[in-house]
Image (cartoon, rainbow, N blue to C red):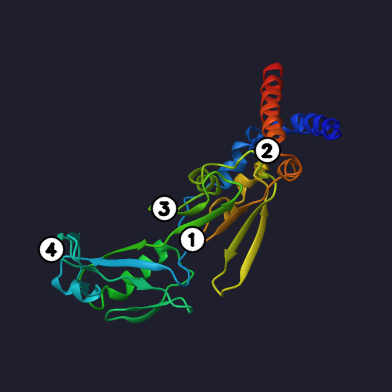
């Protein structure tokens, strides 16, 4: 019975602080239109070592096939385009490129190309400039796709895991949404971001999801491929571990009820 006074004291403390610990981007509406406009960005992912890329070159000239990797057989039906006209194959698909540690790929005809650090658009224009007009009489259409654009989310989220995207862009809130959002025990003010730089070194960032200025930090707001997010547990979970399962469930239920009442009375 000695635990009951401590239990109710902790319950009161948690209930008073629960609501203010939950919202994201507090007071984001106070950011001016000028600030948001100055930081507006159509994100274009940069190519990094170990990226897996699909690169196709399209043009009217039959010689364009020399700038596409040979086909590899498979047992599935696939359709690929090596010219402006789609070529349908009963078995086979284009090979992919793996970016080396030096940021290079070995491209047909052109040899080794250093594209690491370039955005996708920059790399497409770079490859096209090497082909036209030296090899083709028309400017080819070069298309690059990332095949391994993914981020990892772990810790106090509903569904930890690895999440990929087809549009080669993912914000930190999109990643957390894919992971089912933070649990009630997840710390909103101290999320860990681990990022691998092009030279293999690790960058460590601590992120406050409640800070409205996160919207203005393009390097953090937009995640990069292979970023790792870890959501730490808050003090409430640590304190709740001191009690048994019944007390913990009771605390959570009462805390939610008091939070709802406090919101209604605001």
Give the distance between the C-alpha atoms of the residues marked 1 and 2, in whole angstroms: 39 Å
Quadrant in the picture for the N terminus: top right
Determine the image quadrant of residue 230: bottom right
Toward the top, the furthest residue is 265
Whether tag 1 and tag 2 are in contact, CB under 8 A, the answer is: no
Q: Residues within 10 Å of mark 2 (few under 14, many from 20)?
A: few
Callout in the foreground (4, 3): 4
Whether tag 4 and tag 2 are in contact, CB under 8 A, the answer is: no
Quadrant in the picture for the C terminus: top right
Q: Residues within 10 Å of mark 3 (few under 14, many from 20)?
A: some
Q: Is residue 149 left or right of residue 259?
A: left
x, y (%) of residue 114? 43, 77
Helix, strand or loop under label 3: loop
x, y (%) of residue 118? 46, 67
Q: To which residue does mark 2 refer?
A: 245
Give the distance between the C-alpha atoms of the residues marked 2 and 3, in whole angstroms: 39 Å
Helix, strand or loop under label 1: loop
Give the distance between the C-alpha atoms of the residues marked 1 and 4, in whole angstroms: 32 Å
Q: To which residue does mark 4 refer?
A: 90
């Amino acid at each position: 019975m000695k635990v009951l006074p401590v239990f109710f004291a902790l319950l009161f403390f948690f209930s008073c602080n629960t609501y203010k610990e939950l919202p994201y981007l507090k007071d984001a509406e106070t950011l001016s239109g000028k600030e948001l406009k100055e930081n507006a960005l159509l994100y274009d992912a940069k190519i990094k070592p170990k990226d897996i890329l699909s690169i196709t070159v399209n043009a009217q000239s039959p010689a364009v096939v020399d700038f596409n990797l040979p086909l590899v057989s498979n047992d599935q039906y696939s359709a690929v385009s090596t010219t402006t006209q789609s070529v349908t194959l009963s078995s086979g698909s284009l090979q992919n490129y793996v970016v080396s540690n030096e940021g290079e790929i070995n491209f047909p005809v052109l040899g080794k190309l250093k594209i690491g650090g370039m955005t996708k658009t920059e790399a497409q224009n770079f490859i096209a400039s090497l082909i036209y007009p030296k090899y083709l009489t028309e400017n080819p259409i070069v298309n690059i796709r990332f095949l391994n654009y993914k981020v990892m989310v772990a810790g106090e989220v509903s569904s930890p895991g690895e999440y990929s995207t087809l549009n080669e862009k993912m914000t930190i809130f999109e990643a957390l949404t894919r992971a089912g959002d933070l649990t009630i025990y997840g710390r909103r003010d101290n999320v860990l971001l681990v990022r691998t730089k092009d030279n293999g070194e690790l960058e460590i960032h601590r992120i406050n999801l409640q800070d409205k200025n996160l919207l203005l930090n393009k390097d953090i707001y937009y995640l990069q491929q292979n970023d790792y997010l870890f959501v730490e547990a808050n003090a409430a979970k640590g304190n709740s571990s001191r009690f048994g399962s019944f007390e913990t469930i009771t605390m959570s239920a009462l805390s939610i009820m008091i939070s709802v009442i406090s919101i209604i009375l605001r």
